Image (spheres, coloured by chain):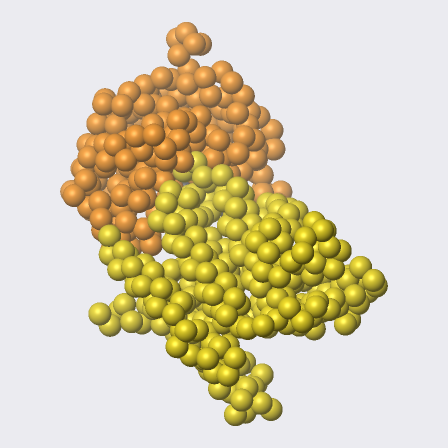
Amino acid sequence: MSHSDTLLRVDKISISFGGLAVLTDVNLKVDEGELVGLIGPNGAGKSTLFNVISSIYKPDTGDVFLKGKKITGIAPHKLCRMGISRTYQLVKTFNKMTALENVMVGAIYGHKHGGSDAKTRAIDAMSLVGIEDKQNILVSHLTLSDRRLVEVARSLASSPLVTLLDEPMAGLNVSEIKTLLTVIKRAREERKISILWVEHKVDAIFRTCDRVAVLNYGAKIADGKPEEIAKDSKVIEAYLGESLTRN
Amino acid sequence: MKNLKPITSVVLATLLLGLIPFVSDSEKSYLVYFLFLTFCHIVLTQGWNLVAGYTGQVSLGTHAFFALGAYTTAMIWRADLFSWENYYFDPVTMILSGLVPVIFALAIGIPLLSKLHGDYFALGTLGFGEILKVVCIKGGQFTGGPIGIMLPSSVYTTMRPHYWTALFLAFLATGVVYFMTKSRVGLALVAISEDETAASSSGIYILKYKVLAFAISAFLSGLCGSLYAYYLFQVSPEGFLILRWTLYPVLMCVIGGSGTVVGPILGSLLMTAVFTVTSIYLPGIHPIFSGIIIILVMLFMPNGIIRLWKKGV
Ligand SMILES: Nc1ncnc2c1ncn2[C@@H]1O[C@H](COP(=O)(O)OP(=O)(O)OP(=O)(O)O)[C@@H](O)[C@H]1O
Ligand SMILES: [Mg+2]
């Protein structure tokens, strides 16, 4: 694989909280247009890695690169404008605003060209995720599933190069999960954006992603094609065995 | 939008209120003074509303900016800074009295608001007011010490300019809050008050908007301080650097409904009436009474009158 089409790369990231090592020497990359799944047991450090990439945490060592440019420590709002958007495991929508206003925030402030055409971009993003009919509803009145979609639309409205989705399917029912899966597929097909996707629904990950990386106790234990990962003995021992019995 | 109605009524009310000095004797009737005081409270309350109600940063420094505005007016006048004939209700003097607090708001706001935790800001602004008080009391000739700066009260003829200026400032403050919050800036402010992490990862430069709201609030408080200096003709720590100028606006905003445009107006009107009545009829227990009201409001209607009323509709 040529080096030039790597979009996002994390290089030897380590971080600890109060002596507890949460990530150790994690390397990961996402190529242009690639859909990468990130799985691992609870507490493995997946969300922490997202927080490092989006500059909410500063890593103790290691760096993050976007298109080969070092971006470690750049303020979160600047990163968003540079093309990294995200959603949160515990949904972070602005609940006193309408759905459209939420998405407008991403369109106005998250986009590198600021406010021009913001409304068009916001409505496009809402149509893509299929909530264009809920524009004027207060977000506090929406279901969890719709709030997730609002968050995804807000993230897409900033026209990102790469978007980080942290367990977008958690807490959703079967039909809502299907909707979200369609949204993820459409986002990459229609927008050509790269996606890094954390999820516990491993079957969805294996069926959809181009590549899957596995974190366990803060270290990456596997990274490859879904078929390979599903057979990897280390992964089965650390995670899949458990999750298969759980399902 | 739905909110067009309240703002139309605010414009109409302003025009009608402007006529009151023609029908009510501004020197003898209590009404003109009462409304003057209410308008001043609206200005301060809207300023606080912008910072706390919309942006979620609790400032306890309103009185400091109010006093800075008053001292600026007094000092310009005393020093005869522009060698003008008249500094009484001079627009340039008043605008400068709004801008000086802005400079201080930037100087303390940027470091205090860079800290992620809101408590620093509340305590920092409170501390700023206390430092300012010490400086003014110990300031010797420059600040006039505990007595402050006396202004030539011989220029006073009527209460009318005070009334109209206060009305104008209340209208201005309400208009500024309205347009700030209906615009894209308002979207950023509300986003920040709801979730700073989500706001910043959606591209909002949090510090910039917090400081902007704080600076505008300081400007409004400074203008109001200048106006009040023209009313008292004595700018002293005891008249201006007292917590009532911070606590009343907080109370009025919370009672009326913070984070709304009309709430602060309702809260100011109601509480100015309540405080006026209690200070006339129950002067001894007035402070205790205010304290009890604060506690009751926080317990039973933390969202303000405006939201009670909206729920009812
Ligand atoms: N700010 C923090 N302070 C202290 N510990 C933290 C902090 N953030 C994360 N941790 C710890 O780091 C570890 C990894 O947490 P993280 O949320 O990244 O896991 P995860 O892989 O996302 O798990 P899950 O699948 O449950 O979401 C946990 O033990 C967590 O308690
Ligand atoms: Mg997590």
Residue at the image point whose x is 34% and y is 60% from the top: B11
A177 or B141: nearer the viewer: B141
Q: Determine if residue A63 is in view.
A: yes
Q: Is A118 situated left or right of A21 in this image?
A: left
**Residue B18 image offset from top left, x and y in percent:** 40, 67
**Residue A119 image offset from top left, x and y in percent:** 28, 35
User: In this picture, is B4 found above or below A30?
Assistant: below
Residue lying at the far front in this picture: please name it: B85
B26 or B165: nearer the viewer: B26
Q: Is A160 situated left or right of B277 in this image?
A: left
Residue lying at the far right in this picture: please name it: B140
**Residue B59 image offset from top left, x and y in percent:** 56, 59
Indicate the quadrant containing the C terminus of chain A: top left, top right, bottom left or bottom right: top left
User: Residue A100, located in which quarter of the rendered image?
Assistant: top left
User: What chain is the yellow one?
Assistant: B
Residue at the image point whose x is 71% and y is 51% from the top: B83
Ligand 2's image quarter is: top left
- Which color has been applied to chain A in this rendered view? orange
Indicate the quadrant containing the N terminus of chain A: top left, top right, bottom left or bottom right: top left
**Residue B271 image offset from top left, x and y in percent:** 46, 77
Residue at the image point whose x is 50% and y is 63% from the top: B165
Q: Determine if residue A91 is in view.
A: no
Residue at the image point whose x is 46% and y is 80% from the top: B25
